[in-house]
Image (spheres, rainbow, N blue to C red):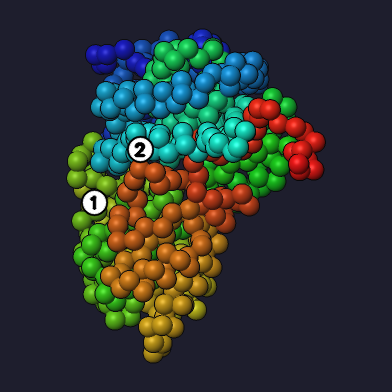
Amino acid sequence: MREEPMHSYKLYIAGKDVDGDGWVYTVSSRSLLEDVFTSVGLKRELERDPDSDSAGHPYIAGRCAIAGDGAIDLATEAAAAAAPGWAAVPLERRMRLGTLFREELIRRQDEFVAMLVTEAHPVRLARWELSCLLQVFSEESLEWYGSQMHTEFAHGDRRLIVRRQPDGVVAFNPPQNAPAPSAALAVLALMSGNSVIVRAPRSIALSTMWLMRDVVGPLLDEVGAPPGVLNAVCSNPRQTIDRWLADPLIDDIFYIGGSQEGLRFQERCVAAGKKPILELAGNDGIVVWEDADIPKAAEAISEAFYGSGQICMVPNYVLAHPAIADRLIAEVAERAAEVRPGYPEDEEVLLSPVRRSERFFTLLQGALDQGAELVTGGHRTELDGTESETGVFLQPTVVRVDGLVAARGFDIVRHETFFPLLPIVVPDGTTDDAELLEAFVGFVNANEYGLRNSVWATSHTVIDTFVQRVVNGGLLKVNDSHIGFLPYLPSHGGTGLTGGVFGEANYPMLKTSHVQGVSIARGISPRDAVFGS
C-alpha cells in the first residue's frame, strides 16, 4: 500500500481550492504496462466511490476535481476581475515571475520529472521537456522578452514609447501528450500582464494541476498578484471551449491540438471576436546535403523516434542527397535500432506506449503499396522489444521513398503521422546540384505545415540558400539537434497548418499582448506639430 499521501487537487479559482463535481484519477504509467486491467478497474472504482480503500493502492498517483459549467464560468469571472489590477503592476515586477519560476523549476526538478514519468514520459524526455522551460525562462530569454515589451526613444522634445499591453484574459488548452510543459507557457502570458485560466485535460490532469497549484500559484502570491490572476480547472474540452467562446470576458484562447480541429476552432474564435493562438501539428523536415556529417545528421534524424514520434516538433520526413542516401539510410537504421521500449523510469528508454496503433499500419501499408521500401521496423513489440501482435510499443520504422515528385503523393510525407514512422525521400534522375538545391528549397517551402526545419551541410552556399530562402516554419536549425532548445529562439510556433492564418514563431509573452505607441511631449505646439513651424 501507499506510504505517502496521494496527490489530491481541487479546482483552483481566485486563489482558493474549490470543490468540483466528482474526481478523475491518475494511475502510474508503470501500472499500465504491468497490469492494465487492474489499473483501469481501480480508476473506475474510485470514480464511483472516492472513499474506497483503493485510494491507497500504489498504482494510484493522484486525483483532480472535475469542473462543471458553473466552475468554468466562475474561473473566467475571477480572471476578469483580477486582470485590470495585474495589468497595472509594473512590467519589472511581472518579469520577476519568470526568474522565480525558473529557480523553482530547478529546485523542484526531481518532482517535475517524476510527475511526467508518472504520465508515461520516458525520464530522459522528461528532462528534455524541463530543459525547454529552463531555456524559455533563461536570463537571456527574459531579457529579450523585456526589450520587446517596452522600448523608449528620445525624439526632440518628445519621449516616445513602443510597448506591448496585455490582451486581458487568456484561456489555455494544453494537449494530452505534454500537458504540464505546455501549461507552463501560461506563465509567459502572466508576465505580459494577463490573467489566465488553464484547463487541465481530464484524462491526464495531475501534472498540470500540480504545476499550476503548487508551483506557479505560490510564486504569484510572492510577487503580490491579486487572487484570480491564475485559475486552473480540470474539465471536458468541448464543454470548456464552448463556454470560453461564448463568454465575452475571454480575450485570447491558446489552443494546442490537431490541425483540422484547430483550424475549425480558429474560425469560431474569430467569429466570436477572440484572438486564436494556435499550436497545432508539425511535419518537420530535415535536409541532408552530400557534404553533411552523416553520423551526426543520423543522430538528429533519430530524434523522430523519441516518445514514439508523439511529439509535434520531432522530424517527420528527410530529404537526402542521392550521393549519400544509401549511407545515410543505413546509419539511420542503426540509430533506430538503438531506440528501445521499456518502463519510463529506465534511463535507456526513449519509446512510449502507443495505445491506438491501427493507423500506423494503415499508413505504412499505404506507403508500401505506393512503392516505398521498408528499411527497418514495422511491427508491434512487447516491453522487452520482442515482436508481438499485441505489444503496446511500435518499432522505430524507416521507409525509403524514391522521387521528389512522387513523394508528395505519400501521406506519410505530406502529413504528420504522430508515430515512429519516418520516410527518407531520395530524388531520382540526374539533376545537377544547383537544380537539386532549388528543388529541396521548393519542397520544404511547399510543406503545408510549418513548425521546424533542419539542414545538414557544410557548403556555405547551401546553408546560405536555406537560411535566406526558406520561409516555411517558425524555426530553422542548421547542423544542430532538431528538437534541442536554445535561449532567445522560439520553442514553439509556426506557419501553415501548424499555426493557422496568424501563424509564426510563438513567443507567448508577445502573442498574448498587443503593440501600443506612446508620445509624451513637453512644450510642443499642437498646431506646429500638425502644420510645421
Residue sitting nearer the eye, 257 or 502: 502
Residue sitting nearer the eye, 302 or 343: 302
Q: Is residue 36 left or right of residue 444?
A: left
Q: Disc 1 on helix, strand or loop?
A: loop
Q: Are marks 1 and 2 in contact (CB under 8 Å)?
A: no
- N-terminal of the pair, mark 1 or mark 2, is 2
Q: Disc 2 on helix, strand or loop?
A: helix
Dot 1 amino acid type: Arg
* Above or below, 14 relative to 149: above
Q: Residue at x 71, y 31 (%)?
A: 524
Name the quadrant containing residue 352: top left
The answer to whether residue 532 is seen in the rendering is: yes
As measured in the structure, the alpha-carbon distance from the residue carrying label 1 to the one carrying label 2 is: 36 Å
Q: Which label belongs to residue 446?
A: none
Name the quadrant containing residue 435: bottom left
Q: Residue at x 32, y 23 (%)?
A: 104
Residue on which disc 2 sits: 140
Q: Residue at x 51, y 9 (%)?
A: 16
* Above or below, 185 relative to 423: above
Residue on which disc 1 sits: 340
Q: Quadrant of the N terminus?
A: top left
| Whole-percent x, y for residue 419 in the image | 40, 54
Residue sitting nearer the eye, 458 or 197: 458
